[in-house]
Image (cartoon, grey):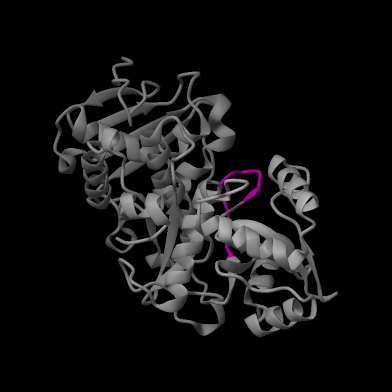
Amino acid sequence: MCPNVPTNPPLSGVYRDEFINHRKLVWDLSDPRITSHHLENAIPMALLYWTREKERIINNLQELEIRVPVQLEAKAYCLFLQKKLFNPALLTINIIFAGGPQDEDNPVFPQDWHDLIIAPPPTIEQIQQIMAEANLPIPQGLLFYQNVSNMAAGVVQGRIFGLKVLTINLAQQTVTVEVGDADGGLGLQVNNWRAETAMTDAQLLQAIATERVNPANAVLELYAIKEEHYLESKVLSLIATGGNLPEPWEFIIGGSVFFQFPVITTRNGRSRYIDILARSGNAPVVIELKVASNHSDESEYYFQAIGQAMSYAGYLKGALHNEDFGGLGIQFNNIKPTVLFPQFSIQHNYLQVFFVNLTTALNSKLNANNNLGHYTVNLGAWQQNRTVTF
């Protein structure tokens, strides 16, 4: 093996390669600097490396062998999930574990998750009634969310443009106004602000909504935090209202109380949550969003979205390939991974070319009905006033 991968992003110098007969690439993950993010992006980065660094025609790549060291085996389940999206007639992917072979069985979607997800969600009218009885407004940008970890308890979370501001207990018909994590720095700042101004819960919600949309005269600078959740809330609203989107996305489940869909991408069964699960016709769409404002390496952070979206899509395809939630006509075999983020900044604008090349390379090897979609939001409009345009 020769560690000859260049260090310029998005290909950090942690992957090791070997070419065999100009048709096979061996991708070695034994470098001790390999993280879970590198692991999850190993397959996409191998294809980008083949086309970019060696100037090889992607159609010539017929076999990809990934060698996983013992210390990463527990986290490598995501590679099996991503493999489910590829057309084996176009690319054979072999995953070699140093500790011996591992099963590639279809993942399991837990029955209790299934039962909760198909149960009728609370209606927006129920939520509005509880808010009214608590004498609380529903200011601009306040959306309501459920995820599988708190559905059984009847808990709904409220976020103003992605910032958590309250929790609703459906059984008790109560609302608790609490910004961010109770013991986090933001929560303490808001509590201090509230004590200094003697604001009521209703006034606090209105003040937060104002700060989230207008950075002028801001007290806590809430405009700039939780940007990924902010983008998520804007895209959710566009889907709910039939706004201007790159595809005619609709919700599979919910639409007024938004549902956070769980996936499992590791052997230990720990759940992760898809940013947005939508549908385009009868095809589910996994949408992974990124905003790199607080990350030192913008390029690597955005490229992480690809591996995540593919892992999530592979999990749902494997676990729910025979599922049709409530007769909705959804075909999880046709699930499409999609990434969405603001345009690259000026200093990294050249990376857009690499991103397009990577998408093209992946789609030449993926099943046609599992192709990767990628869309960028106008950076200037986003930074100026959080407008989402494509």
Q: Is residue 107 visible?
A: no
The residue range painted magenta reads 260-271
Exactly how many numbered labels are in the figure? Answer: 0
Query: Is residue 346 something one can see in this rendering?
Result: yes
Image height of 198 relative to 134, above or below: above
- Toward the viewer: 130 or 21? 130
Question: Residue at left 31%, top 64%?
Answer: 369
x%, y% of residue 221?
Answer: 57, 46
> Could you say which is closer to the camera, residue 331 or residue 354?
354
Q: Position of residue 331 (x, y in %)?
A: 42, 72
Who is closer to the viewer here, 330 or 120? 120
What residue appears at the point 34 percent right and 60 percent down from the top-left corner? 370
Q: Quadrant of residue 351?
A: top left
Q: Residue at x 37, y 56 (%)?
A: 338
Quarter of the figure that contains the C terminus: bottom left
Q: Quadrant of the N terminus?
A: top left
Does 2 appear in magenta?
Answer: no
Q: Answer left or right for 299 relative to 204.
A: left
Residue located at (44% from left, 32% from top): 38
- In the displayed structure, 26 sits above or below 134; it is above
Coordinates of residue 337 in the picture (x, y in percent): 39, 57
Q: Nearer the viewer, residue 263 or 291?
A: 291
Residue 170 position, x and y percent, is 78, 75
Corner quadrant of residue 172 = bottom right
